[in-house]
Image: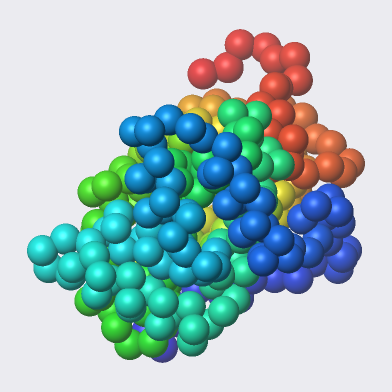
Amino acid sequence: MSERQSAPPMTNHSRPPVLPPTLSGIDIDALWREIVEGACGCCDPLVKGLLATGIRNHATFGAALAALIGRKLGDRAVADDALSELVTEVFAADPDIVAAAAADLVAIRERDPATGNYATPFLFFKGYHAVQSYRVAHWLWNNGREYLALHLQSRSSELFAVDIHPAARLGRRILFDHGTGIVIGETSVLEDDVSLLQGVTLGGTGKNVGDRHPKVRRGVLIGAGAKILGNIEIGEGAKIGAGSIVLESVAPYTTVVGNPARAVGTRHSSLPAFTMDQMLPPLDYII
């Protein structure tokens, strides 16, 4: 079995997922209409062309997203128009990628207090752009176009300072808040409803090959600068404190902090990725 096939499938926990009503189902056409309406509210003459190119010139969410990825990642090696056409073909082959992108956008609006509408993250949030670029690269990787997938990974890393290996496995409703400095290794798994802040690394511990990166379960919140290393599991609903170094698996609904990280509290329920609550319980001094 090749390394890119070695990542385990995402697990389905015995308890059915309980999602906020606004995330349980998305009408992509209605979402696009709201994005267009939001873009029409701006009267700044210097921004009108940007809004037209990014939003108003496109009939659908998928078409606008394909054009955006092409503009962002296109270069002299793969031109903007050619890349946008490629992304359009990928979306046609797997419409679920577009659905996942819409779900990610809704998650950003729900969780990020700096987001006043859908047009803002769609156009300007590089964490969102990096995840959607990854989704295209992941499809290419799984369909035998590995060098093109790696090219998109490289361009995304250069432009967004976010490095996601195209073989990694990401679920839906993923939020990379700020995005800068996030690194996701080849055999990493992020299940649905995960939120990461800037500077997070999901990495290996050395030169091991095969399945060697973290598995992050549903609803996890990972604070800024945290480093999670090795083939370990971060249980559902866990919270990783900012700056923590995590070298061992974390139990579900448990908060860990420090270097090396240790448990400082547990909860019976709730998913911190939804609330983005980074507060910790009262602590003794910890490095």
33 left or right of 243 in image? right
Between 105 and 230, the one lying in front of the other is 105
Q: Is residue 235 above or below residue 113?
A: below
Between 274 and 102, the one lying in front of the other is 102
Q: Position of residue 154 (x, y in %)?
A: 24, 58
Q: Is residue 8 above or below residue 253?
A: below
283 left or right of 201 in image? right
Q: Position of residue 128 (x, y in %)?
A: 48, 50
Task: Confirm whether residue 15 shows in the render.
Answer: yes
Q: Position of residue 162 (x, y in %)?
A: 36, 47
Q: Residue 83: name its quadrant.
A: bottom left
202 left or right of 97 in image? left
Q: Residue 86: name its quadrant.
A: bottom left
Task: Confirm whether residue 247 shows in the render.
Answer: no
Q: Position of residue 249 (x, y in %)?
A: 61, 50
Question: Hey, which residue is sitting farthest left in the picture?
Answer: 76
Q: How is the image coloured?
A: rainbow
Between 194 and 60, the one lying in front of the other is 60
Task: Work out which quarter of the rendered image holds the N terminus and state it.
Answer: bottom left
Q: How many marks?
A: 0
State the residue at coordinates (24%, 65%).
80
